[in-house]
Image: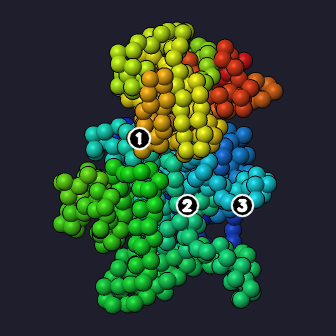
Amino acid sequence: MHVLVINAGSSSLKAAVIDAATGERLTELTADLPAGSSDHRTKMHPFMLQLREKVRGISLSGVGHRVVHGGADFDGAVRLNEAVEEKIEALSDLAPLHNPVHLAAIRLARELWPDLAHFAAFDTAFHHSLPRRAQTYALPRDLIREYDIRRYGFHGLSHRYVAGRAATFLRDDYRNLRLISCHLGNGCSVTAIEFGRSIETSMGMTPLEGLVMGTRSGDLDPGIPAYLHRKTGLEPHEIDKLLNRESGLAGLSGAGHDMRHILEQSTAGDPDCQLALQVFTHRLRKYIGAYAAVMGGVDAIIFTGGIGENSSIVRHRAAQRLDYLGAVIDEDKNHSAQLTVTEDVVDFSRSHSRVKLLAIRTDEQLAIARDCAKLLRNEDEVNTLPSIPIAVSARHCHLTRETLDQLYGPGYELTVKKWLSQPGQFAAEETVTVVGPRNRIERVRILGPLRSVDQIEISRTDEFFLGVDAPVRESGKVENTPGCQLLGPQGSVDLEDGLICAWRHIHMTPTDAERFGVQDRDTVEVTVNDAERGLTFGNVLIRVSPDYKLEMHIDTDEGNAAEIDSGDAGVLQATGQRGTLRRRATMAT
Ligand code: ADP
């Protein structure tokens, strides 16, 4: 499938026709747009015509447009239509330098290739999974709501792509890994990717926050802009320009924004360039440490983007002395690493390093082409999908033989109270008391049969009541979760870990998965198609096993919030996030 990928910026237009299966470029065009006051459409028009000539004769399946800001609306690539364009336009407030340019390119391209399907892929989409604690700025809540102020995150196409490449390289599923991805280009950002989901990222509501960048300051004391205004009389738009265009490496070094030049000058002894390099890499190290703390560990740290891919000095400064994290740099491998199209991943950690250090060539255009190809493949599907029953799971626990022995006496057998809809699973007559630092919850139902790890699934409300901080996890992933004490009639057990807030999920058989066009551990979006409420559950995890029965599980908090009771049912419609495709499920209640 050949996809024309268009990346329109305010000063340049980059386009390529890409074979989505192989990544091969059939043709490419890069044009610097003239500076000046004419509107985006006028500036781009001659280059778009040139592009049309260039791709004439190539059989195209679709056109993919890169869009920087997808706001809260888009958690994956979408087919463009009037409604989507309006949303992109409405988001221009949040990305005034980007979205209007993208929109001009989209509209022009749709005129030039009217018969092709056009898609938008968003830099923000991958970060839809950020938990609220990571999304939220500590500002007055009414203001936050009124003006959509929150962390959106950017560079998502790149972070997602390199996470996938890292997993393939490490011969693992990226949903088993904890990754820290450092995208260091003209813009720079770090993302913590925990078991396949972006859970923290350094860029915020705008691409200004976080790392030091070519011309952007990244983090600074929020008191500084007001101070600058008072001292210099600079107006808000001028301060904006200062922080976005005149700061960062360029501002500190006084020698421009190009890292190559700064490296040369710092070697030659220029103190300003030396400081710029130090501030840049110090900030990066700080984020790496912080994100390892957020995830409770890390399996691989990825360096990508023009600087991350090419500068062994920056990698050395960022990754040295991370032994305490389990990451040991191999200086020779780092120094000699040369990324190419064919050798696009280099491991520059020592062979005994528990945490891998990887330099990976990013390819956002290929990520866009693949998203488009996926959506194209799935578009023909007709929506004749079965309905999905919804079950609201009350708090419960799964225990090991050993734990049950201690709580109920050696060799104790659970008594079936009620068989559950998932074959072979039952709610037992037996319950336990869960004791947290603040409170205890009595009569927490044990579900059978026994398992190989202890796991207690509670709701967010329970979490605050118990006084613990339990992460949202899929069943079975209890690493680095809080523990608690369990009390039974014959004894007690102190668990080191095991408390989770269950990640809402849909159980299904492989046959169902095929029908819905999803795979195990994809995340999907589920809309409750009720005229009054029109509710959407994002980030619903797909669990596939021949032993499962089709059913969506949400916890009591979610059930209460959505006014859904067990016994309601739903129907799945179309579309796809990061696995194979995103599906929109319609809950017919
Ligand atoms: P963008 O973010 O615009 O896509 P890139 O990812 O191409 O940009 O990164 C551009 C940055 O990469 C520039 O700061 C450039 O100096 C830097 N860079 C490119 N090659 C090297 C190199 N060999 N050593 C250090 N920095 C490099």
Query: Which mark lies nearer to you, 3 or 2?
Result: 3
Q: Could you classify mark 3 by the number of other residues whose Cα lies within 10 Å: few (under 14), some (14-19), or many (20 or more)?
A: few
Pick the residue in front: 301 or 51.
301
Q: Position of residue 444 (x, y in %)?
A: 56, 25
Identify the residue under disc 2.
203
Q: Could you classify mark 2 by the number of other residues whose Cα lies within 10 Å: few (under 14), some (14-19), or many (20 or more)?
A: many
Earlier residue among tags 3 and 1: 3
Earlier residue among tags 1 and 2: 2
- Give the left or right position of residue 420, taking residue 493 as reference: right
Task: State the colouring used for the structure image.
Answer: rainbow
Q: Quadrant of residue 81?
A: top right
Amino acid type of the residue tagged 2 in the rendering:
Met
**Residue at 62% across, 61% down:** 206
Identify the residue under disc 3.
139
Task: Establish if 19 lies above or below 91.
Answer: above
Q: Quadrant of the N terminus?
A: top left
Q: Position of residue 273 (x, y in %)?
A: 41, 85
Name the residue at the right extreme. 532
Task: Establish if 72 lies above or below 533.
Answer: below
Q: Could you classify mark 1 by the number of other residues whose Cα lies within 10 Å: few (under 14), some (14-19), or many (20 or more)?
A: some
Q: Position of residue 446 (x, y in %)?
A: 50, 21
Task: Establish if 175 lies above or below 567.
Answer: below
Q: Position of residue 335 (x, y in %)?
A: 22, 68
How far apart marks 3 and 2 lie (CA) works out to 17 Å
Identify the residue under disc 1.
496
Q: Check disc 3 and report its element: helix, strand or loop.
A: loop
